[in-house]
Each structure stands twice: as C-alpha cells, then as structure tokens.
Amino acid sequence: MVNKITESAIEKFAIELLKKSGYQYIYAPSIALDSDTPERASFEDVLFIDRRERYLGTNLLPYWVHNLMK
C-alpha cells in the first residue's frame, strides 16, 4: 500500500520546520478579520505591514537607497 502525501501533511511539516527554526506560528483564525485580534483590513491583504514594522522597524533600507528608488 502506498502512502499518499496530502496538502495537510506538507503544511504541518512546513509549520514544524519553521517553528524549529525560530519562527512564531499563529493560527490563521486568531488573526482573521472577525477575530478579537485582527491583523489585516481585508483577506486580500497578504502582507502584514504593521507586524513587519513592529518587529523590523520602518526604515529597513539606508537613506541613499530610498533616494535611488524615487
């Protein structure tokens, strides 16, 4: 009998691998729009800008890089 690899199994594996690498895992419904702690204005928002700014800071690139991008 052949074991099938499912999307769920791959997702669980990836989550565990990232957690072991030091990443924090947050169950999606806990940050959904209708939760007590929503982290996005729309389900179309795929980047959590507020979270990024909180952890990495808003000025990630040197001043001269910002000027080049203008």
Image (tube, rainbow, N blue to C red):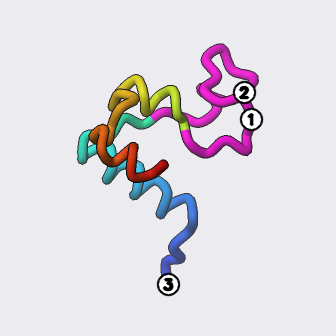
Which label lies toward us, 2 or 1? Answer: 1
Q: Determine the residue located farthest toward the top in the rendered image.
A: 36
Report how far apart the C-alphas of labels 1 and 3 lie in the structure. 41 Å
Give the labeled residue for mark 1: 42
Q: Which of marks 2 and 1 is nearer the N terminus?
A: 2
Residue type, numbered disc 2:
Leu
**Measuring 73% from the left and 40% from the top, which residue is drawn there?**
43
Residue type of the residue flagged with mark 3? Val
> Residue at coordinates 72% horizontally, 27% vertically from top-left?
33
Q: Residues within 10 Å of mark 3 (few under 14, many from 20)?
A: few
Residue at the location (65% across, 14% down)? 36
Do the residues under discs 2 and 1 have CB atoms within 8 angstroms?
A: yes
Of helix, strand and loop, which one carries label 2?
loop
Rendered position, 13 above or below 16: below
Q: Do the residues labelled 2 and 3 touch (CB within 8 Å)?
A: no
**Residue 64 falls in image quadrant:** top left
Q: In this view, does 38 lie to the left or right of 10?
A: right
Q: Which residue lies furthest to the bottom in this view?
A: 1
In three-dimensional space, the C-alpha distance between marks 2 and 3, rounded to whole angstroms, equals 40 Å
User: For the residue labelled by badge 1, is the local secondary structure a helix, a strand or a loop?
Assistant: loop
**Label drawn at residue 2:** 3
Q: State the extent of the magenta-drawn residues as a range.
A: 26-47
Which residue, given by chain and number where applicable, does mark 2 sit on?
33
